[in-house]
Structure formats: C-alpha cells, structure tokens
Image: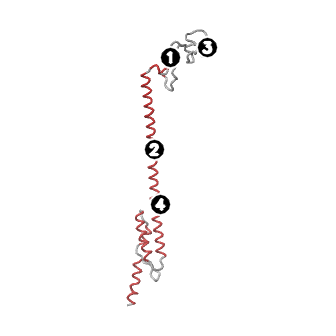
C-alpha cells in the first residue's frame, strides 16, 4: 500500500507544476506563455491568476513559481500603466476640446454683441440725424452741444459764455467766432 501511495506522489507534483524531488521542473506550458507575454490587461490578469494558482499549489522548492508570479504581476502593472496613460491623454484631449469650444462660443457671443451694438447705433443715427457725428465719422461720439439758438459759437466747438450775438471780443479766448453746426 505504501508503495502504491509513493508511486502517485510524483504525478501529483507534476500536475501541480512544481519541482520534483530530484529538482526537475514539470513543464505545463506556463513558462512559454509567460515568455510570450500578453497583449492586453485582461490577458495579463489571466496569466497572473494562473501564476498565483501555480504558486499556491507548490509544496516545496517554489522559487520558480514565485518568480513567475512576480513576472506576471509586472506584466499586469505595465499594461495597467499604459491603459491609465491612454485614459489621461484622452481626458486631456477632451478638456482641450471643451476649452476650445468655450472660447469659440465666447468669441461668437462677443461678435454678436458688437454687431448688435453697431445695428443699434445705426438705428439711432437714422432716427436722429442731427446727433450724427460731423463729416460722417464713426467712433466716439462728441458730447451733445446745447441748442445754439440765440448764442454765438466759438471755433473750438464751445458756445460763447457771454455773447448772444456776434460782436467784437466774442470767443477771443476760444479761437474766434465760427458758424454753428
């Protein structure tokens, strides 16, 4: 009976992927799979689970199984880092795209506000032609002058503070008397 139990012991060690008593390693194909590596993180996770199972089944001289487990974990970590880097790059591209869209929307809103302002000024100018700038110039509007009726206009654009009709000395400090606009 003991002889029968001893005969099965090497087979159990072979099935577990561990070392034989004489130091030979059973080749279950795992090491060649590990050497080929894996193409994706899920594939690497399967490889890591296989390595963990091999290490857990090992009963003696398990350095090789532990080394295989460390190697498979390194493969998983490398694929995980690559995935996280791709995700970070995609997120950065999305943020840049959103920022560009916001900037384009802001610029469009500014253009629309400027266009609406120009249209409003044009409507106001059409309604009150007397308030249009002289010479048809656009830009900053000059302050409105008080009604010049009964007053003398000076060449610097002001009304004479003292004269109500043209006479000697009117607008002497304002460049002389000129026609009122």
* Nearer mark to the viewer, of 3 and 2: 3
Residue at coordinates 38% horizontally, 84% vertically from top-left?
Answer: 8
The residue located at (40%, 67%) in the rendering is: 46
Q: CA distance from mark 1 to mark 3?
A: 21 Å
Q: Secondary structure at mark 1?
A: loop
Q: Which residue is mark 3?
A: 172
Q: Is residue 70 above or below residue 125?
A: below
The residue carrying pointer 3 sits among few (fewer than 14), some (14 to 19) or many (20 or more) residues within 10 Å by Cα, namely: few
Q: Which residue is mark 1?
A: 147
Q: Disc 4 designates what residue?
A: 81
Where is 17 relative to 157, above or below?
below
What kind of element bears circle 3?
Answer: loop
Which of 167/7 is in front? 167
Give percent across and percent down for residue 146: 51, 18
| C-alpha span from label 3 to label 2 | 60 Å
Q: Nearer the viewer, residue 170 or 129?
A: 170
Q: Is residue 62 above or below residue 181?
A: below
Element on which disc 4 rests: helix
Left or right side of 163 for 94: left
Mark 1 neighbour density, 10 Å: few (under 14) some (14–19) many (20 or more): few
Disc 2, SS = helix
Q: Dots 3 and 2: beta carbons under 8 Å?
A: no
Dot 1 or dot 3: first in sequence order is 1
Indicate which label's residue lies in the foreground, 1 or 2: 1
The CA distance from mark 3 to mark 4 is: 85 Å
Residue that badge 2 annotates: 100
Q: Nearer the viewer, mark 3 or mark 4?
A: 3
User: CA gap, disc 4 to disc 1?
Assistant: 79 Å
For marks 3 and 4, the one nearer the N-term is: 4
């Amino acid at each position: 009976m003991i002889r029968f139990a001893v005969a099965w012991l090497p087979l159990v060690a072979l099935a577990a992927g561990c070392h034989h008593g004489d130091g030979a390693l059973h080749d279950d194909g795992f090491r060649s799979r590990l050497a080929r590596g894996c193409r994706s993180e899920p594939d690497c996770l399967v490889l890591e689970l296989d390595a963990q199972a091999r290490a857990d089944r090992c009963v003696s001289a398990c350095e090789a199984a532990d080394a295989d487990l460390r190697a498979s974990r390194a493969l998983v970590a490398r694929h995980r880092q690559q995935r996280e880097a791709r995700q970070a790059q995609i997120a950065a591209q999305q943020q840049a795209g959103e920022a560009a869209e916001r900037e384009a929307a802001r610029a469009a809103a500014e253009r629309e506000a400027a266009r609406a302002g120009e249209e409003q000024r044009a409507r106001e100018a059409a309604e009150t032609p007397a308030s249009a700038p002289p010479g048809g110039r656009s830009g900053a509007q000059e302050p409105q002058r008080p009604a010049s009726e009964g007053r003398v206009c000076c060449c610097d654009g002001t009304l004479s503070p003292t004269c109500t009709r043209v006479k000697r000395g009117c607008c002497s400090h304002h460049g002389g008397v000129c026609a009122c606009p």
